[in-house]
Amino acid sequence: MELEHRHDPAAIAARLARGARPNYLRDWVYGGIDGAVTTFAIVAGVVGAALSANIVIILGLANLIADGVSMAAGNYSATKTEHDELERTREMEHRHIAMDPDGEREEVRQIFRAKGFEGETLDRAVEAITADRERWISTMVTEEFGLSENVRDPLTAAGATFAAFVACGAVPLVPYFLFDADVASPVALVMTASVFFMIGSMKSRWSLQRWWVSGLETLTIGCGAAALAFGIGYALRGFGAG
């Protein structure tokens, strides 16, 4: 089995020097799936209600922009909250170390004792960590509070979500600009199902699932939402007519 990266000293040094980088895959997958699901659900609902192709386009485009902005704004706020929590915790630890350094050293000692450090090894570990204020704070942030200092940039996360939402959410609408409604509907179904499967398959690169299992899982979720919307539209067909 081929390993994901090399382990010779030079390769390790280069990789560690680059540091951990935020991964925006979740933002892309989140936006892509939601964009395709919600837009296609609208299309399916309109088709189920036997409304015109113009209604499909109008409602689809309105959803594409409004819901895309809403998703991006929500992701921005959520990601910024992670930054705020990290900064608040770092500031608190900085204050605690300044006011009660002995108590904070004892916290470090107990944390590393729980990891199996004992005797002189434990003493040296505590001394090394507490000798540098930033290292000390970072240790407490990650070990005591379980926070990661490798946080995503809120604007980049929001941008990835919006871009994926619009790109994938536009797919169900494209056939309605190119074909008559009778042809556009099955074409939109095939194209959107392909997007669901593609997103799921790509997602498998960062999971333990087989690519086709992940693809089918996402396809099932997306088509299930669309089928529900179609059923509601069909059930309400003619509602309010006249």
Image (cartoon, rainbow, N blue to C red):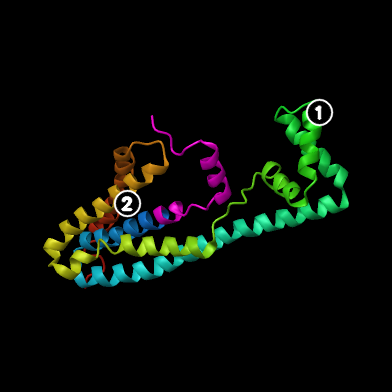
Q: Position of residue 111 (x, y in %)?
A: 74, 35
Residue 227 in the figure: left or right of residue 31? left
- On residue 225, the disc is 2
| Observer-nearest of 134 and 208 | 134
Q: Residue at x 37, y 60 (%)?
A: 164
Image-quadrant location for residue 235: bottom left
- Look at the picture and state if 84 lies above or below 196: below
Q: Is residue 156 visible?
A: yes
The secondary element bearing badge 2 is classed as helix
Q: Position of residue 240 (x, y in %)?
A: 26, 69
Which residue is farthest front?
10
Q: Position of residue 141 (x, y in %)?
A: 70, 48
Q: Residue at x 32, y 57 (%)?
A: 36
User: What count of labels does the image hold?
Assistant: 2
Q: Residue at x 47, y 37 (%)?
A: 6
Q: Nearer the viewer, mark 1 or mark 2?
A: 1
